[in-house]
Image (spheres, coloured by chain):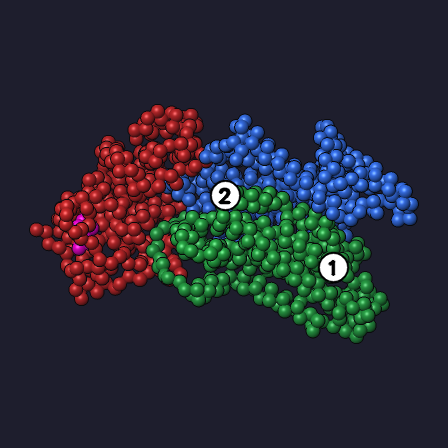
Chain colours: A green, B blue, C red
Amino acid sequence: MARIGNVLAVPSAAPVETRGMRLRNFWSDYRRSWLAIGALAVILVLLVASFGAPWLVPQDPYDLAQLDWLDAFLPPGTTGSGGYVHLLGTDNAGRDMLSAILYGLRTSFLIGISAGALALTLGISIGLTAAYFGGRIEALLMRVVDLQLSMPAILLALVMAAVLGQGVPQIILALVVAQYAYFARTTHGAASVERRKDYIEAARSTPLPTRRILFKHLLPNVLPPLIVVATVQVASAISLEATLSFLGVGLPLTEPSLGSLISNGFKYIHAGRSWLSIYPGVFLMITVVAINLVGDQVRTVIDPRNSR
Amino acid sequence: MFGYLVGRLMQAAVVVFVMSVIVFVGVYAIGNPIDVMIDPGASQEIRENLIRQYGFDQPLWLQYFTFVGNVFQGDLGRSMVYNIPVTSLVFSRLPATLELVLVSVGIATVIGVPAGMYAGYRPNGIAAKLIMALSVLGFSVPTFWIGMLLIMGFAVNLGWLPSGGRGEVGQFLWFKTSLATTDGWAHVIMPAVNLSLFKMGLMIRLTRAGMVEAMGTDYVRFARAQGLPDRQIVFGHIMRNISIPLVTVFGLELGSTLAFAVVTETVFNWPGVGKLIIDSILQLDRPVMVSYLVMVVLLFVMINLVVDLIYAQLDPRVRLKGGS
Amino acid sequence: MTAALDVKGLTTRFETRAGHVTAVNDVSFAVQPGRIMGLVGESGSGKSVTGFSILGLIDAPGEVSAGAVLIDGIDLRQLSDEDLRKMRGRKVAMVFQDPMMTLNPVLRVGDQMAMAVRVHRPMSKPDALDHARKALEVVGIPSPAERLKAYPHQLSGGMRQRVAIAMALLHSPSVIIADEATTALDVSIQGQILAEVRELADTTGAAIVWITHDLAVVSSLADDICVMYAGRIVERGTAEQVIGGPRHPYTQGLLDSIPALHEPGRKLPQIPGSTPQLSRLPEGCPFRPRCPRATDLCRTEPPLDVRDEQAVLCHHPLERA
């Protein structure tokens, strides 16, 4: 029972922290997990590799002129007609899988990050509005949010994707609709606690405009829990997009993402061509797990209950 | 208690109404189902007859009221693809999904709760770290990809289990279920494991968090000061405390597992409602989509209600009040 | 007469990021059966950790690193974990500060008490409940049979603390450690419970360690008093000695700052400064920076000065008038 006893009074300093100190403390706390450092490094490498893909890989997998049917279904490590080695093999259209995966990863990142950012913005606005104004507005907004939270995101995303149709903007919109509620709930929860504190009352009694109070006073205080939710939601958006594409309501193969690559490869698993689905899946898994690990560590670091 | 129930049921009714409108309008916006249903070469006359037959020429609100009126008579419309009543279509698919969901939630609980309790009891041990790492994998790796790996491993490479479909169905009491036959189990086990991984990850984390929190409480220290052995503290005291949030999550997750079954059913070609909804979305089978979604919402509301009732039973501090 | 509780050189350390912190530093005292010992100190002085160390309830990152804890002559520190567990609740019991938190909110009082009974004495549940009911009667709880069926939140704060005390009494332990047991209660309830505790010590012969920050409480309750500062006992003696003629400047400062013992209308004296951080103790006497009598000599470890059983850890103890 290792926990019992740590809570006993071992007096600790309560130093006044500046913003710079806080950042440095954050980093020194974050650094304590090797796993979390590794995960962060992996994410950075993947970001560079995917957004730098056009300069890094031998082929633009979506330029049909660069594809050759004769190269179809080459197993990993074979040299194709282009004269270079297909490290991860080729697909049914003769696409170099490594190139396709990095291009696909770029789309996945793009979708995950934009959906996360948009959902964050929408969620913060709704959560802050509700918490600040209270009363009817709050009741109505949060009722809608709670209703949405009681439904699984996958179902909402599925319906939205079905309604909106295929394509990157459509998918982003579907994901935002499915995910903003998490941010709204978190913002509202944290902001309601802050609102009752004296400093907000003090700010409200001065002739400061509402907007200023919301963004200068409330927002900074609700930010820490939101950062955690945001990391988790970006990972979840990437994973949801892949799932939707796999189900056939996300992106078509012509607009590649990891999901549509796996979906395409799924057709060939019985034919023993497992590289078509395994490799994009491995990249998807590494990406999502790495983001979640970073989120986990951030949560551990900023949770005041974990500080000693 | 009675007032509470009535209040909650009223709330539930409002939720179902709102969702049905949203879903109806949303689904209405998707393509034109007539184009999917008939041969593009069919004459204009046949087209218009069909449009009239399904009432698509009427304004949206009128279509909605016709729909609601029919729903109250137990008629959810006819599937445009299968041309049979949606009700019988959904009910014919429901048992397959329910058995999948039950087995997977069972697996998630039986493995996830003890694992989480252990991880919370010795949070710094190697076993705990390993359990937590697995739980991160469980809920971050997309379900469909794990499902695919399972098929590759156990069906394609090893050939131990069938790669998809529902097995032989046997009679159990008054229903037919694949859980009554060995072949049925062989078919259900892989999709059920696949579907359970996410829940398991969640169960592990929640149980662990509850355990860690409980271990630091004064009542646990007090119990230790009384000389209670750890085993009794965990099973006599803590178990009761963490069971409260767990039951809540268990109930809510039952619903979301039903939704996630969509993915697993697609991967394993499992003939449940999840596969049905995907097919109906891809084929623009509007009545099936609307009915499925309305039914799912209804189900969620019911589950929430039952969870609250159980919660009140478990936690003596909670007293049910009339609907707010 | 052998002491019911004899603590010798008890030392407890915590491993923190700032390094080793000695929360309890070479603490020694003894309590005879039927007597009440007040363990007084400010928060952070190590008095609660002392209580937990006696019961062997210190977990990582903390560790009892030296000393002996004898209860009826048995050294708890020499026992195996399992034997130590069997001592807890049976030979030595503990009562905590917050009665809201010490009872499990989701279990009935009776169930919790029956569990505590049966862990040391195998008997049927109805018998255990009967035993629990009698214990509730002893601490003056009206209609105890009904209280057994109640959940903790259905009881008042004073009632809950009585239940906790009753649970400590279940096995008639030789030693009861009460950690701020009345601090969270109303003053009137506190008075009642203190009177009952005094009576319990007299009738049951249990030795009681009463841990508190409130010198006024122990002055009316305790037979003996230990004053803790920064993990050490700085003064030890009978209640009359310590209250009537304190020899350590810190004890003197504490007594001076009790309003009730002071002349009305005069400014209340205070001890300057605040409790030092255990991780950054000054060398020599830890009270030196706050002490009016401090000299350069105080930069060295203070000696133990004993006179008429009244011990004090100080270079310049006050002389009794």
Which amino acid type is marked by label 2?
A: Gly
Q: Is residue C255 magenta?
A: yes
Name the residue: 57% across, 56% down: A121
Query: Of B128 and A126, which appears nearest the observer?
Result: A126
Tell me if A129 is positioned left or right of A12 in this view. right
Is residue C67 visible in the rendered structure shown here? no
Is label 1 in a helix, a strand or a loop? helix
As rendered, which of C321 and C151 lies closer to the eye?
C151
Chain where mark 2 sits: A
Instruction: Characterize the local packing of mark 1: few (<14), some (14-19) or many (20 or more) Cα atoms within 10 angstroms.
Output: many
Which of label 1 and label 2 is nearer to you?
2
| Left or right side of B48 for A117 | left
Residue at the image position 80 percent from the left and 73 percent from the top:
A82
Q: Position of residue B91 (x, y in %)?
A: 74, 35
Give the dominant element type of the magenta stretch: helix, strand or loop: helix
Secondary structure at numbered mark 2: helix
First in sequence, mark 1 or 2: give its number.
2
Name the disc covering residue A135, or none: 2
Q: Looking at the picture, do discs 1 and 2 lie on one chain?
A: yes
- The residue that mark 1 highlights is A261
Is residue C16 located in the magenta-colored stretch of the structure?
no
Residue B70 x/y as whole percent = 74, 32
**Which residues make up the magenta segment?**
C249-256
